Amino acid sequence: MKINTIPQRLIIVTALIAASIANHPAQAADAAGPYHFIKEIPIGGEGKWDYLSVDAAGRRLYVSHGTKVAVVDLDKDAVVGEITDTPGVHGIAVAPELQRGFVSNGRENKASIVDLKTLQTSSKVDTGENPDAILFEPEHQEVYTFNGKSQSATVIDAKSGVVVTTIKLSGKPEFATVDPKAGRIYNNIEDKSEVVVIDTKTHEVVNHWPIAPGQTASGMAMDLEHHRIFLGCDNKLMVMMDTTNGKVVATVPIGDGVDANAFDPATQLAFSSNGEGTVTIAHEDAPDKLTVVQTLKTEKGARTMTIDPKTHRIYLAAVKYEAGAAPRPKPIADSFKILVYGTEK
């Protein structure tokens, strides 16, 4: 059955991407077909990893890795530097106009402020306990860290590095995204299976939206044009939610172990990276319709992901594991790497 259905999926995703190219010719000229493996970028070293972040304008990929951040040149597909002294790093947020980066250091309850030219840390700011997801809000030039253990968000002035306020949340926060024009930040509250909405002007939580039938969402991505967010849920669903009213308008099945989502506005494709070793790719056919068009095979444990909107490539972090039938195979030393998938021939 699976062998017979693969060609049909390839035809569908090619047609959908081709239709999107017709509507977005300047943006999507390189998006020519179904996703497939392109290459590996070796990183090496030991330690856990979490979020990846793309600076499309600066042509850099930032990769969390234990106590440091690996910096990859997106055009050369090579490591060009690292940000050090980031214990328990989770996420990286970039403020291109300020030439600053911000790193959430989970094990020391701080955020690093980094010069993007030199990759040197200029200062550190105290946050809540275990800062995890982090984002830059460009309208007010503020940085938000979402603190898992203290169930809060720390708001930092990106220019001065001073804490503006702390926002109490309803549960354990996971990934978040921002709509600058709407003045809203959307954040997954993992243990409550809800999305909280934060007003970026007042720093107040203004809505709590249930994500049912989704449960325990971690990943989040946003379609700014159509006011939709995509949530990766632990019960193997991708939820599409209307950010104007919090209504769940569509769901599709995804793989097991999701931890990240991405969205490509040029192709209208939403991605879910699943730790089982797949990426579910769905097309936003309409603001209330989502269709799975490809299940991309990756590698076991490749659960975090980001996208380069210029090339439409997706990047996933992974390690090689020792052969064997153990339920938790041991990682091979010095095998940390980035998997690159794209549509180009």
Image (spheres, rainbow, N blue to C red):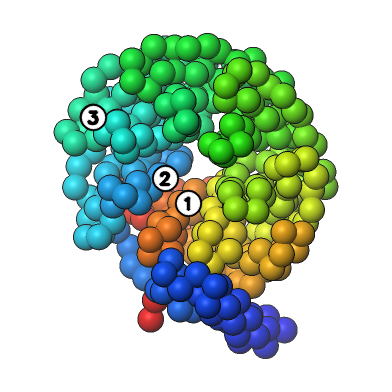
Q: Which residue is mark 2?
A: 52
In which quadrant of the rendered image does the C terminus lie?
Answer: bottom left
Q: Which residue is mark 3?
A: 115
**Does the rendering let one see residue 314?**
yes
Q: Is there a contact, CB below 8 Å, between mark 2 and mark 1?
A: yes
Is residue 81 shown left or right of residue 151? left
The secondary structure type at the circle numbered 3 is: strand
Q: Position of residue 228 (x, y in %)?
A: 67, 50
Quarter of the image holding residue 3? bottom right
**Observer-nearest of 172 and 275:** 172
Is residue 188 shown left or right of residue 34? right
Estimate how packed mark 2 is, as few (under 14), some (14 to 19) or many (20 or more) residues with alpha carbons within 10 Å. Answer: many
Estimate how packed mark 3 is, as few (under 14), some (14 to 19) or many (20 or more) residues with alpha carbons within 10 Å. Answer: some
Q: What residue lies at 72% left-to-right and 51% top-to-bottom? A: 239
The mark found on residue 305 in the picture is 1
Q: Is residue 129 above or below residue 63?
A: above
Q: Amino acid at mark 3?
A: Asp
Q: Amino acid at mark 1?
A: Met
The mark found on residue 238 in the picture is none
- Between marks 2 and 3 in the image, the one whose residue lies nearer the viewer: 3
- Compare marks 3 and 1 and give the one earlier in the sequence: 3
Q: Is residue 42 above or below residue 11?
A: above
Q: Position of residue 267 (x, y in %)?
A: 54, 67
The secondary structure type at the circle numbered 2 is: strand
Q: What residue lies at 58% left-to-right and 78% top-to-bottom? A: 19
Q: Position of residue 88 (x, y in %)?
A: 41, 28
